[in-house]
Amino acid sequence: MLNARGVPHRLRHIGRIVVISVMQVDLERAERELKLYEDENSEWPPIYETTKPRGDEFLISVVLFGALAVLLDLSQGSFSYIVEAGRVSAAKMLWEGQWWRSVTALTLHANFRHLGGNALVGVFFLSWLIKDAGAGFGLLLFFAAGAAGNILTVIYEGMPHISVGSSTALFGTIGVLSAFAVLRRRDMPWRRWILPLGAGAALLAMLGGPGERVDFTAHIMGLGAGFLLGLPTGKLLERHAAWALISQLLAGVGAIAIVAISWALALS
């Protein structure tokens, strides 16, 4: 720093102590420059406050997966036809343009064991997403990332790909949270902000890695879609605006509308 300011000096290392030596005529200037440097960097590195999800954020997540449990019960009873109408089907999506299946499939599950596994992890991550993004944007990102992941999977794998489940949205949620973490660390050295990417990859390996009856491609696509959606959304949410409450309400209504319209098209 003294070099940059043109102050002649010499450094000596005595153990862990660094001694700065300057000429007597430069002493006052060196002290002034060092004081300015300390004042300018007094709040570096920035401290980011992290809080755990509150009860209402957890409740929203539980209600969502509770609704999926009700839908699963209906699909295994008198309304079994909704599975055929709503599941991801590459043939129906690619050849008949039924892209709404990318949304409806997120609300369907093969059985209660399938739903329970997704809910056990999904409630936790969705609660964190709602804490960071708000209820409206949290739900909208959950379904948008999941739907985008399903579409990318169909395009990549082609026919005869068929699937159901909210796990694509779950990994989309992890992708969004990873993007938010990168944005919070963007002023830090690259080794610090790259950590969330590694964390997301590690969670993918632990929770959704290759295995029997595991749609690994959909998990990767969901994670990637969530990350790409999370970057611009995170920047948008950083801007405190007077219409923040209205935007959350609109996003929440949008999330509900996307699911409702998709099911209306599926059952029409």
Image: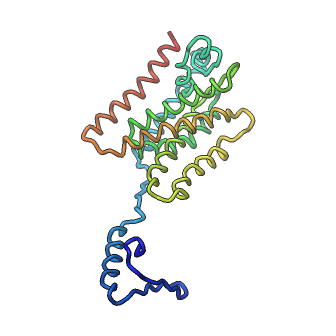
Way the structure is coloured: rainbow
| Residue at 33% across, 68% down | 40
Residue 49 in the figure: left or right of residue 178: left
Farthest residue to the right: give it.
212
> Considering only vertical position in the picture, is 182 above or below 220?
below
Can you give x and y, in whole percent of width and height, for residue 146 in the image?
Answer: 54, 31
- Looking at the picture, tell me which residue is in the foreground, 245 or 227: 227
> Considering only vertical position in the picture, is 71 above or below 169?
above
Query: Which image quarter holds the N terminus?
Result: bottom left
Q: Residue 260 appears in which quarter of the rendering?
A: top left
Farthest residue to the bottom: give it.
24
| Count of numbered tags | 0
Q: Residue 166 appears in which quarter of the rendering?
A: top right
- Looking at the picture, tell me which residue is in the foreground, 97 or 29: 29
| Residue at 46% across, 55% down | 185
| Residue at 37% across, 32% down | 251
Q: Residue 114 appears in which quarter of the rendering?
A: top right
| Residue at 40% across, 75% down | 2
Can you give x and y, in whole percent of width and height, for residue 83 in the image?
Answer: 60, 19
- Looking at the picture, tell me which residue is in the foreground, 92 or 252: 92
Can you give x and y, in whole percent of width and height, for residue 104 in the image?
Answer: 53, 23
- Looking at the picture, tell me which residue is in the foreground, 238 or 28: 28
Can you give x and y, in whole percent of width and height, for residue 178 in the image?
Answer: 52, 47
> Considering only vertical position in the picture, is 75 above or below 62?
above
Residue 222 in the figure: left or right of residue 130: right
